[in-house]
Image: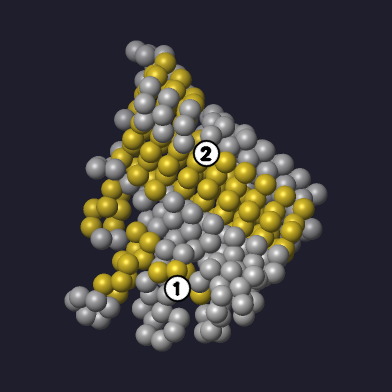
């Protein structure tokens, strides 16, 4: 559905607005003003196990103001192209991996995560973003991506770690975490004065199972603050790592005058400290 303001110049939704869920949907706000007095809920539709059809809201030419919370889950997506984020709380949920044993051999079915994107010159303002990790081996985490010249402004980001769940392992650890929640800066986007919390994982998991913030291309951390927390796994087996949260720079990305706080792993035997990593032509 595309909102056409030729007939209506303002659209006021006094209660909650759901896009998708029982069936996939796409709402494009290409002009005019939308106001949602309750929650905005965006969720894709599962067609078959592991196969989702995406539901999406795109703000491209109009405006979207949300009074209460925004919840994005299960192949739901929200893209801001022409209007800044509302100063509210956005929850971008991670996906999941579920083990099935019939018909044999055992296999995992993966459910999609939510995602959010900022493009052009739009900003996250002073919003709060809870970016969830995936549950189970290989499960995707939620993502927030900044493109073009967009910025995080003064927002708060909590990138949660992956959560322990199903795997196909037959020896310990059989409980394995999915991918952590992630914020990605691309092109010439920048973090400005935002605050990022990247959590360490509380279960065994791959190297990307901690919460993370990535800077690619010519993006810039500017004056943001990053808290990279260590793993909280209480008993480390050594078979699969238990990584901490991380902030990573690639390509020609820059750290600017940002501040990085890297904390040690907190669990007994847990070696996964929070880290800040530079590679390629990135600079501190």
Residue 283 appears at what percent x and percent y?
A: 77, 58
Q: Say which of 267 and 113 sits in front.
A: 267
251 is higher (above) or lower (below) than 150: below
Is 249 on the left-hand or right-hand side of 48?
Answer: right
Residue name at image x 22 percent, y 80 percent: 104
Farthest residue, direction left:
103
158 is higher (above) or lower (below) than 78: below
Q: Which mark, by number, is residue 185?
A: none
Residue 239 appears at what percent x and percent y?
A: 52, 84
Q: Could you tell me if residue 19 is visible in this image? A: yes
Residue 16 appears at what percent x and percent y?
A: 36, 30
Which comes sooner in the sequence, label 2 or label 1? Answer: 2
Residue name at image x 62 percent, y 80 percent: 269
Q: Quadrant of residue 137?
A: bottom left
Distance between the alpha carbons at the discs numbered 2 and 1:
29 Å
Tell me the residue that label 2 is attached to: 89
37 is higher (above) or lower (below) than 154: above
Q: Could you tell me if residue 243 is visible in this image? A: no
Q: Quadrant of residue 118?
A: top right
Tell me the residue that label 1 is attached to: 176
How would you rate the neighbour count of disc 1 (Cα within 10 Å): few for under 14, some for 14-19, many for 20 or more?
many
Q: Say which of 254 and 116 sits in front.
A: 116
Quadrant including the N terminus: top left
Instruction: Specify the color scheme.
Output: secondary structure
* Disc 1, SS: strand
* Disc 2, SS: strand
Is 276 on the left-hand or right-hand side of 144?
Answer: right
Labels 2 & 1 near each other (Cβ < 8 A)? no
Residue 56 appears at what percent x and percent y?
A: 38, 40
Quadrant including the C terminus: bottom right
Residue name at image x 38 percent, y 75 percent: 167
Is 217 on the left-hand or right-hand side of 162?
Answer: right
């Amino acid at each position: 559905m595309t909102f056409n303001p030729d007939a209506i110049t303002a659209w006021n939704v006094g209660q909650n607005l759901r896009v998708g869920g029982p069936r996939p949907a796409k709402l494009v706000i290409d002009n005019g003003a939308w106001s949602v007095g309750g929650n905005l809920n965006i969720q894709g539709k599962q067609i078959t196990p592991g196969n989702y059809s995406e539901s999406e809201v795109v703000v491209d030419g109009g405006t979207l103001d949300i009074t209460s919370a925004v919840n994005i889950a299960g192949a739901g997506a929200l893209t801001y192209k022409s209007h800044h984020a509302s100063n509210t709380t956005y929850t971008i949920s991670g996906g999941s991996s579920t083990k099935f044993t019939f018909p044999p051999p055992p296999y995992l079915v993966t459910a999609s995560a939510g995602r959010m994107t900022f493009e052009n010159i739009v900003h996250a303002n002073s919003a709060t973003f809870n970016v969830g990790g995936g549950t189970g081996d290989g499960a995707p985490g939620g993502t927030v991506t900044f493109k073009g010249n967009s910025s995080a402004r003064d927002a708060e980001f909590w990138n949660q770690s992956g959560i322990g769940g199903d795997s196909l392992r037959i020896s310990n650890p059989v409980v394995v975490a999915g991918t952590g929640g992630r914020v990605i800066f691309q092109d010439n986007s920048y973090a400005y004065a935002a605050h990022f919390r990247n959590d360490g994982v509380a279960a065994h998991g791959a190297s990307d199972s901690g919460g993370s913030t990535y800077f690619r291309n010519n993006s810039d951390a500017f004056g943001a603050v990053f808290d990279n927390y260590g793993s909280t796994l209480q008993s480390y087996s050594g078979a699969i790592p238990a990584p901490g949260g991380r902030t990573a720079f690639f390509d020609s990305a820059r750290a600017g005058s940002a501040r990085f706080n890297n904390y040690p792993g907190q669990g007994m035997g847990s070696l996964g400290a929070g880290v800040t990593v530079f590679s390629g032509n990135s600079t501190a």
